[in-house]
Amino acid sequence: MESTPSIAQHEPGADNTRQHEPSPERLLQLGMGFWASKTLLSAVELGVFSRLASGPQDAAQLAEALELHPRSALDFLDALVALNLLEREDGKYRNTPDAGFFLDVAKPSYVGGLLEMANARLYPFWGSLTEALRTGLPQNEAKGGGNPFDAMYRDEHKLRGFLRAMSGVSLGAAKAIAQQFPWRNYRTFIDIGAAQGALPVQVALAHPHLRGGGFDLPVVRPVFEEYVTSHGLQERLHFYPGDFFKDPCPAADVLVMGHILHDWDLAQKLELLAKCYAALPPGGCLIVYDAIIDDDRRRNAFGLLMSLNMLIETPGGFDYTGAQCREWMQEVGFTQVRVEPLTGADSMVIGTR
């Protein structure tokens, strides 16, 4: 027979010690967080949110369209409801507003490219985090002697997926930079490591007086130019081919380097910063943005986890605090260096030549 708590347990002055006993709930939720993560990643892979963009569907319709086995279809769809990724009413499922806006592949706001990459590459590699922490070595394709970037850039499908993922990572910060930085004081800008061109497009859309473009490896050109043309900006934004470790950076009033600096070791970070400094005119600015870790290294969990991702993915890359980036930029000659928050985990560090 199930017992019920006595009234005395809830009376003022009663011993309520049991209410304050430690609970494992948060630890278990965190430790088993990969359950929810993989459920979302599989939903993106299966195209659940794009399928529902045209309107609500019931479980049978979705199961048939997505080729789901009947044993698991309801559990999967209802788990997405419980995770606040789908809504269900009268037996029909529909996207939540966030999922519909950001996870429908047909929308320009789609950020699922990053999740696609996480599902295809990062998810299995993170299973070797303990080994990485003990050895300091990457756990991706490099573990077998390969170069993940070479392999990706040789495969057009993988390259396009990667570049679209980079747009997903950068879009929020790009919009914030377009609004926060005093672009009215400058005429030209170049995004170093531009990928698909998310930042140049957002800045150009917000500031019609600006002209600029993106600097990246030559193989990126067609993807960049398609993206820019789709926004009607091909007359103002141009592609500059090159390798930022082998070639000088193109000159402009403002250079931007987003989600690039964390890929490299300290010596390489300083080399890239010095190249940017050399390409700027007096009074020109460099904007560096990343998931910059708070100086106290307590709050930006995403930035710290991203640094662990650099451990998994690169030989020497790591994320960094605002104070560290200020110090590095000052070391290569920048002045008036300041840190400004953007959106989510991202911040930007601005330095003037």
Image (tube, helix red, strand yellow):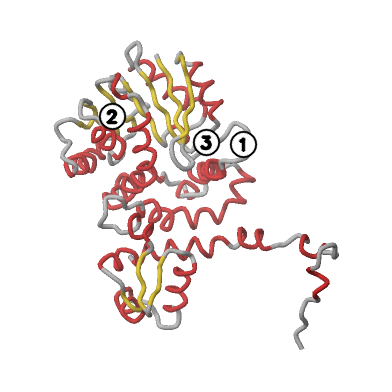
**Could you tell me which secondary element the residue under label 2 belongs to?**
loop
Q: Is residue 242 left or right of residue 272?
A: left
**Could you tell me which secondary element the residue under label 3 belongs to?**
loop
Pinpoint residue 274: horizontal percent, then vertical percent. Answer: 42, 19
**Which marked residue is nearer to the observer: mark 1 or mark 2?**
1
Dot 3 or dot 2: first in sequence order is: 2
- Amino acid type at circle 3 is Asp
Task: Give the residue pinned by disc 3.
Answer: 319
Q: CA distance from mark 3 to mark 2?
A: 24 Å
Task: Give the residue pinned by disc 2.
Answer: 242
Q: Which mark is residue 297?
A: 1
Residue 235 higher or lower than 109, as above or below: above
**Could you tell me which secondary element the residue under label 1 belongs to?**
loop
Q: CA distance from mark 1 to mark 2?
A: 35 Å
Question: In the depicted view, which residue is nearer to us: 91 or 62?
Answer: 91
Question: In the depicted view, which residue is nearer to us: 103 or 220?
Answer: 103
Pinpoint residue 182: horizontal percent, then vertical percent. Answer: 34, 24
Instruction: Write down the quadrant of residue 32 in the picture.
Output: bottom right
In the picture, the quarter occupied by the C terminus is: top left
Pinpoint residue 350: horizontal percent, then vertical percent. Answer: 43, 23
Q: CA distance from mark 1 to mark 3?
A: 11 Å
Instruction: Write down the quadrant of residue 192 in the picture.
Output: top left
